[in-house]
Image: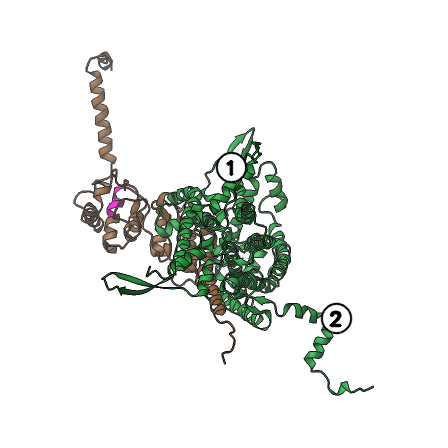
Chain colours: A brown, B green
């Protein structure tokens, strides 16, 4: 040990220690690190990612960047998850047609298989909310009344009592929920698209999301019952007032004119 | 003891009438009123629409009171509407659900009640505008104008309290809105709110209090005013439009019995029928879809019924100003709309008195004006309506935004600007239109009606043949009388002594000129003008 301690102040001592330390960490890493799986993986998952990347390059990269990192025209997609892709592309919102206050819903031009491939690529960029399975969003057997209560507490501020939609600032809006599929409603709650806040499972468990979906389907869908007759858009007093003026008072004034025109006349004879 | 008269007994009807006359004096009443004349014009039936819808509201309202529980006790719903089962709600809301789903005919009656209320207010407003634009509010009918106006305002509040009774999420938001307005009143606001709600909002009293206001207090006052309104209509006799044979001293039309009574009675059933059909077709205030009121919940698109819409507009477009002084907040963003709210209504109510002051006219008027012949009044009325309508746009700004794909901020700014500019523009445009129509009338009187027949004269010129109007039409077009503007007169007399002219007198003279000056009305054709033109110097 004497020899070693005598040379401890040698100009090269520090370099030797550094080399030893590097060799030790490198050796330990090589010994314990998991085996590299990336090479030559031909699974279905990687094929989907590969195909998704191609679709992405054609349809999305101009705004979201070549690697999903985002540009001044579109946000980063790293960590948005497959649920966001399934919602945005599945409802036709993405790819967007033009910039504006809000990207509207439009006709979807991708097949479900292509959407899944895009979703696989995006989720390969970073972990995020996963596309729900049917078991998660199927509203069958859910508690409608509880869903109504949850809807009025969390959703009605923007989407109106029964999800007819409403205005937000500067031309933005909360869309009408009629005809939106349960899967897409679920995904919207999960991911919070555009101006919507997200309701992850930690604040709103799966069961509650199902209850809300069941409520929307009961009050605002093609099969929704309107016991009182025409619903007049479900917009409340504004459309009711307009109806009362145009059809109510309009009909009554027409009646008044008719009555006044049929007056008793002296007999001509 | 039998006498000769017993053999020829009077018919049963006559005997009943005799019996009643002996006790009620109906013969002299009938003699005085049965032949009362009512002129015929469709616009005179607008008030009837209001009257009949009021009767319909009372009839259906009585039915609803049989099943409604004005209580805010919390209950769990177990009725037949599935999406609400198990939800905690007030008894008021639960009983409204029961009326809608479990009481026989309940939903239809509820819808008739509510549709009739909307139509009642709309009919009152249109009736009021008819009276306004034809100048029917002039002496001797000023008090009746105010009665009618009061009926409209009371109708607004009766409607508002009724809309709040079911204690649903929409109406609860409206009550909260009202409480916010009360709280904004400096110094006494918090006390007033605590007094009205019996403690903190929403408390447990407001539905019961609104109930007695809605079914007893306000309708009671309205019924009294309504009777007074009708008595005055009888007493003053009805106004009529100018026409041959119609003067300020007569009424031309049909007698009350039997013709007018039959028409009015029939019209009641027509009104009832139309409102019932609407109620059977279209749903109104579907409270089952709105949910029970809870102060922690709110929905977008929460508006009051249309007649309160302008107050909603005032609050929506007002910038959220506030002043903080010595630990107190003056919420101008709410308080200013609260002050403007009665001003909007008062503006139209006081107009008749302003006009009569400007004209200084103390005579009675039973002949109606055609709106074009009173351009300043007509322009004022249209300006007021524009003001009201701009505020209604503000009240529904969110629906304008979503349905016309506009920015809600732009709509709000539009309303802010047109709150001031709209009435001015409307006034100027309407006045121009009225003047144009007056010129048209003058042209028709002097030159006749355009017949559409083109004639070629021997020397090649083309002319359109004008047909002279009938004497009746000439009379109708020239029957209105025109005021001359009030002059202050010389302020210095022949001795050089200066007369003091008060500021109000100057103002009156200036206003009078604005009403009746040369540029503000077209002088109607004189007999000389007419004779000169129609004396036969070729064509015109």
Residue B366 forms part of the magenta stretch: no
Mark 2 Cα-neighbour bin, 10 Å: few <14, some 14–19, many ≥20: few
Task: Tell me the SS state at disc 2.
Answer: helix
The answer to the question of whether label 1 and label 2 lie on touching residues, with beta carbons closer than 8 A, is no
Identity of the residue drawn at 23% across and 27% down:
A24
**Mark-to-mark CA distance, 1 and 2:** 62 Å
Identity of the residue drawn at 61% across and 53% down:
B143
Above or below B344: residue B31: below
Q: Are marks 1 and 2 on the same chain?
A: yes
Q: Which mark is residue B277?
A: none
Q: Nearer the viewer, residue B392 or A41?
A: B392
> In the drawing, does residue B495 fall left or right of residue A228?
right
Residue A122 forms part of the magenta stretch: yes
Count of residue discs: 2
Q: Which mark is residue B23?
A: 2
Q: Earlier in the sequence, mark 1 or mark 2?
A: 2
Check the picture and name the quadrant holding the N terminus of chain A.
Answer: top left
- The disc numbered 1 marks a residue on which chain? B
Part of the protein shown in magenta: A120-126
Residue B188 is situated, as x and y percent measured from the top left of the image, at 61, 38
Residue A138 is situated, as x and y percent measured from the top left of the image, at 37, 57
In the picture of the structure, the residue carrying the numbered disc 1 is B332
Residue B531 is situated, as x and y percent measured from the top left of the image, at 42, 59
What is the chief secondary structure element of the magenta stretch?
helix
- The disc numbered 2 marks a residue on which chain? B
**Whether residue B101 can be seen here:** no
Above or below B266: residue B387: above
């Amino acid at each position: 040990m004497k020899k070693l301690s005598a040379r401890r102040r040698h100009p090269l001592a520090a370099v030797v220690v550094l080399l030893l330390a590097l060799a030790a960490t490198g050796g330990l890493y090589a010994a314990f690190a998991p085996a590299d799986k990336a090479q030559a993986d031909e699974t279905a998952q990687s094929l989907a990612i590969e195909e998704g990347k191609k679709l992405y390059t054609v349809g999305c990269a101009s705004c979201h960047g070549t690697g999903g990192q985002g540009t001044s025209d579109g946000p980063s997609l790293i960590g948005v998850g497959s649920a966001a892709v399934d919602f945005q592309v599945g409802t036709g919102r993405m790819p967007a047609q033009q910039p504006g206050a809000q990207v509207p819903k439009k006709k979807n031009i991708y097949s479900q298989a292509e959407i899944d491939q895009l979703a696989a690529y995006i989720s390969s960029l970073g972990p995020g909310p996963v596309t729900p399975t049917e078991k998660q969003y199927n509203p069958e057997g859910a508690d409608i009344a509880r869903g109504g209560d949850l809807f009025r507490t969390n959703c009605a501020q923007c989407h109106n009592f029964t999800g007819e939609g409403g205005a937000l600032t500067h031309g933005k809006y909360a869309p009408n929920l009629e005809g939106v599929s349960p899967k897409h409603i679920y995904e919207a709650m999960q991911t919070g698209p555009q101006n919507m806040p997200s309701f992850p499972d930690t604040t709103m468990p799966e069961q509650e999301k199902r209850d809300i979906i069941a409520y929307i389907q009961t009050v605002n869908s093609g099969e929704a019952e309107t016991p009182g007759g025409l619903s007049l858009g479900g917009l409340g007093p504004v459309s009711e007032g307009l109806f009362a003026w145009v059809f109510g008072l309009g009909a009554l004034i027409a009646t008044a004119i008719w009555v006044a025109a049929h007056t008793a006349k002296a007999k001509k004879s | 003891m039998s006498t000769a008269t017993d053999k020829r007994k009077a018919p049963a009807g006559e005997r009943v009438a005799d019996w009643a006359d002996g006790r009620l004096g109906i013969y002299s009443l009938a003699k005085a009123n049965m032949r009362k004349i009512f002129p015929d014009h469709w616009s005179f039936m607008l008030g009837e629409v209001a009257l009949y819808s009021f009767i319909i509201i009372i009839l259906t309202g009585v039915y609803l009171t049989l099943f409604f529980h004005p209580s805010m006790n919390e209950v769990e719903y177990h009725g037949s509407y599935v999406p609400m089962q198990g939800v905690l709600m007030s008894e008021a809301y639960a009983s409204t659900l029961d009326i809608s789903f479990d009481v026989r005919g309940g939903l239809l009656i509820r819808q008739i009640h509510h549709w009739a209320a909307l139509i009642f207010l709309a009919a009152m407003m249109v009736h009021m505008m008819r009276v306004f634009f034809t100048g029917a509010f002039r002496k001797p009918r000023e008090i009746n104008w105010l009665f009618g106006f009061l009926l409209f305002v009371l109708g607004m509040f009766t409607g508002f309290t009724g809309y709040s009774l079911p204690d649903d999420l929409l109406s609860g938001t409206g009550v909260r809105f009202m409480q916010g307005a009360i709280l904004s009143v400096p110094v006494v606001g918090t006390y007033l709110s605590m007094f009205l709600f019996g403690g903190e909002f929403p408390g447990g009293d407001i539905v019961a209090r609104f109930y007695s206001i809605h079914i007893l207090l306000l309708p009671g006052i309205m019924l009294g005013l309504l009777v007074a309104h009708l008595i005055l209509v009888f007493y003053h006799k009805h106004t009529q439009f100018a026409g041959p044979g119609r003067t300020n001293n007569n009424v031309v039309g049909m007698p009350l019995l039997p013709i007018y009574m039959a028409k009015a009675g029939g019209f009641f059933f027509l009104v009832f029928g139309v409102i019932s059909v609407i109620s059977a077709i279209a749903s109104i205030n579907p409270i089952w879809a709105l949910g029970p009121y809870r102060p922690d919940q709110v929905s977008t698109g929460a508006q009051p019924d249309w007649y309160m819409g302008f107050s909603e507009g005032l609050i929506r477009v007002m910038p959220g100003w506030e002043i903080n002084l010595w630990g107190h907040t003056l919420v101008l963003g709410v308080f200013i709309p609260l002050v403007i709210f009665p001003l909007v209504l008062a503006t139209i109510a006081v107009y008749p008195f302003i006009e009569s002051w400007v004209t200084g006219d103390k005579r009675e008027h039973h002949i109606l004006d055609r709106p074009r012949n009173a351009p300043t009044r007509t322009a004022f009325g249209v300006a007021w309506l524009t003001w009201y309508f701009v505020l209604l746009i503000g009240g529904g700004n969110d629906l304008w935004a979503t349905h016309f794909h506009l920015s809600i901020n732009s709509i709000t700014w539009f309303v802010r600007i047109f709150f001031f500019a709209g009435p001015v523009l409307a006034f100027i445009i309407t006045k121009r239109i009225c003047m144009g129509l007056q010129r048209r009338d003058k042209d028709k009187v002097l030159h006749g009606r355009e017949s559409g027949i083109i004639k070629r004269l021997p020397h090649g010129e083309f002319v359109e043949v004008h047909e002279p109007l009938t004497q009746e039409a000439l009379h109708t077009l020239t029957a209105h009388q025109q005021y001359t503007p009030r002059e202050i007169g010389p302020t210095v007399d022949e001795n050089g002594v200066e007369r003091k002219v008060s500021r109000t007198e100057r103002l009156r003279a200036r206003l009078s000129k604005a009403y009746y000056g040369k540029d503000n009305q077209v002088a109607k054709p004189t007999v000389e003008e007419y004779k000169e033109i129609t004396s036969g110097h070729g064509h015109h």
